[in-house]
Image: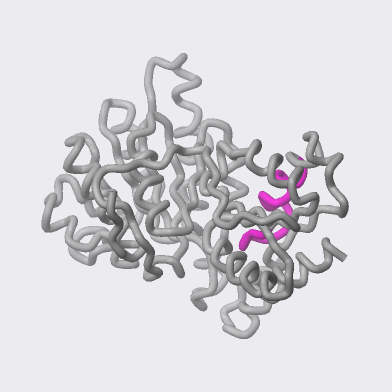
Amino acid sequence: MGKIEMTYKEAIREALAEEMERDENVYMLGEDIGIYKGAFGVSGDLYDRFGPERIMETPISETGFMGAAIGSAMTGMRPIAEIMFSDFLCVCYDMLVNQAPKLRYMLGGNHSVPMVMRTASGGGTGAAAQHSQSLEALLCHTPGLKVVIPSTPEDAKGLLKSSIRDNNPVMFLEQKLLYNTKGLVPEGEYTIPLGVADIKKEGSDCTIVTYGRMVHFCLGAAEKLAAEGINVEVIDLRTLYPMDKPCIIESVKKTKHCIIVHEAVKTGGLGGEIAATITESEAFNYLDAPIIRLASEDVPVPFCPILEKGVLPDEDKIIAAVKKTLA
């Protein structure tokens, strides 16, 4: 199977188109996803190809169209609901927490809720405190909701196709600053299973566990560290819930050191869950140094670019954290 180069958002669009062609029950709904092509241009020509009945423009009411998506999913459709910014998930949090993930359980398995919720996540764009958050820890705290966050075009396409075919609600987090990044994507049909991490770089000295945009920062840091003779392993979780815990544990047993990097704030972040997973496993006995969590500062994301850069993790901070745990 050959590969072709495309951007992250092109890979997402291709996955959407292929799944809509494959299954007539798949449709999209959200704000400005039709003629406007979506807030970040992800929809592209889908409105022209599939029409207004399958690329449905909605009012500015996240609670309303999320409820409509849940209802249609329970009656046999496979909706893909787009929330412009992940911050706006708070507007429809009841649908995310009390409805979509719990209905199959509460109805004794008689109804599934096969739906995908796509949203743009993360900072680095100067969009300030209400348009730059990383809220994945809140989502992972809800049993019944799968949470996916791809870092490359190849992963974005394969994971989105699997998410659409899943019979459970899936939260698909797309990183805003990754939309225009390019990568090689396999030609033809392929999927990537949910719940399987990917070792983006093998190493022997320290394990870096990360996901989303931070994968690229970690790989950049790994390249600079290699020039100093430090060989780190970079694990891209890809799916946050369910998490590929065996991959993390085996890597830490090998390297005996671990840092966890995520863009979300540190307090209550997913880094704590990953660290607990390691300490509660046999990998704890292999550690030669404490686990380090590297995350954003516990402050709202600033509008000022200089302040925002200071709040978010970067390559220099990752390099410093690796050297600290190896000291």
Q: Is residue 9 above or below residue 106?
A: below
Q: Is residue 125 above or below residue 282?
A: below
In percent of the image, x 12 and y 58: which residue is there?
A: 48
Left-right relation of 26 to 235: left
Left-right relation of 16 to 306: left
In percent of the image, x 24 and y 64: which residue is there?
A: 37
In percent of the image, x 17 and y 61: which residue is there?
A: 45
Q: Is residue 263 magenta?
A: yes
Residue 31 visible, this orientation? no
Residue 53 percent across, percent down from the top left: 15, 45
Q: Is residue 156 magenta?
A: no
Of the 4 image quadrants, the one containing the C terminus is bottom right
* Front residue of 261 and 197: 197
Q: Is residue 59 above or below residue 320?
A: above
Residue 118 percent across, percent down from the top left: 39, 51
* Front residue of 300 and 9: 9
Residue 96 visible, this orientation? yes
Left-right relation of 51 to 100: left
Residue 137 percent across, percent down from the top left: 62, 48
The span picked out in magenta is 261-276
**How many numbered discs sit on the rendered protein?**
0
Instruction: Answer with the quarter of the image where residue 323 lies.
Output: bottom right
